[in-house]
Image (cartoon, rainbow, N blue to C red):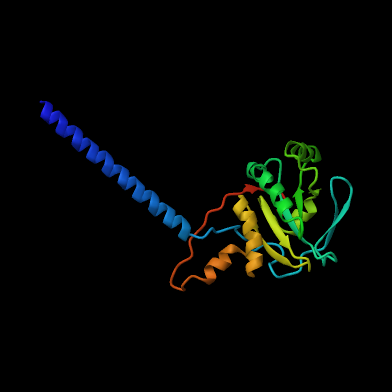
Amino acid sequence: MTETLFISQILLWIAVIGLSLLVLALARQVGVLHERIAPMGALMTDKGASVGEPAPVLKVADRTGQILTLGGSNPMGRGMFLLFVSPTCPICKKLLPFAKHFARSERRSLDLVLVGDGEASDQERMIRDYHLEEIPYLVSTEVGMTYKVGKLPYAVLIGSDGIVRAKGLVNSREHLESLITADELGFASIQDYVSSYKPATVASPVIATSGASSSVGR
């Protein structure tokens, strides 16, 4: 009886060790796949001003009454990053802390401008809750309609020459950074960059990107 119990415990330990080794092997494979799969980045839509075209020139007052010029050549050589958000968009709120960090890290060459629409009181509450007082904030339906924004959060990168450099839905910090990366690489989006290095026989993956619906641009 004792011998049988001893043998069963040995077999049990062998099984546990085998399963542990299998889990480690699977974890290693997942890590390898993660390194090989490139991030898709912001999903670009085909509405509004196209990448490579001049951005529409708009003069809009921000929440403090200061007139901001969106689009057109910037004499200071600064670009502009428009981020369309809404107080009713949970993904937008989750993205705002990253947007603040993004504004600080890119402040030498790029101005972040937040754009929302709807009730001004709701916008002001979100600004207070997320401490966005230092970032220019426009409450404007006109801007969203001009850029044909249908889902949020959405971003448009405008170069210092007034040309649309990149644009797309941005659901994460990686998506925000992907627009800058795509522009630096000379592509409209990370998808275009990845596609340019894929063999013609390999089909592009279908990426499902969620986004909160927006009333602007409809």
Q: Residue 14, how many percent across, how many down?
A: 23, 40
Residue at 72% in and 39% down: 130
Q: Residue 15, how many percent across, how many down?
A: 24, 40
Q: Residue 55, how many percent across, how many down?
A: 76, 65
Closer to us: 73 or 120: 73
User: Would residue 209 be visible to someone looking at this image?
Assistant: yes
Residue at 31% in and 43% down: 20
Q: Residue 66, how many percent across, how many down?
A: 89, 50
Closer to us: 175 or 4: 4
Q: Residue furthest top?
A: 1
Where residue 76 sits, quadrant-wise, is bottom right
Where residue 72 sits, quadrant-wise, is bottom right
User: Would residue 139 be visible to someone looking at this image?
Assistant: no
Q: Residue furthest bottom?
A: 200
Q: In which quarter of the image is the N terminus?
A: top left
How many numbered discs, if any?
A: 0
Closer to us: 98 or 105: 105
Closer to us: 166 or 141: 166
Left of 155 or right of it: where is 198?
left
Residue at 11% in and 29% down: 3
Where residue 191 sits, quadrant-wise, is bottom right
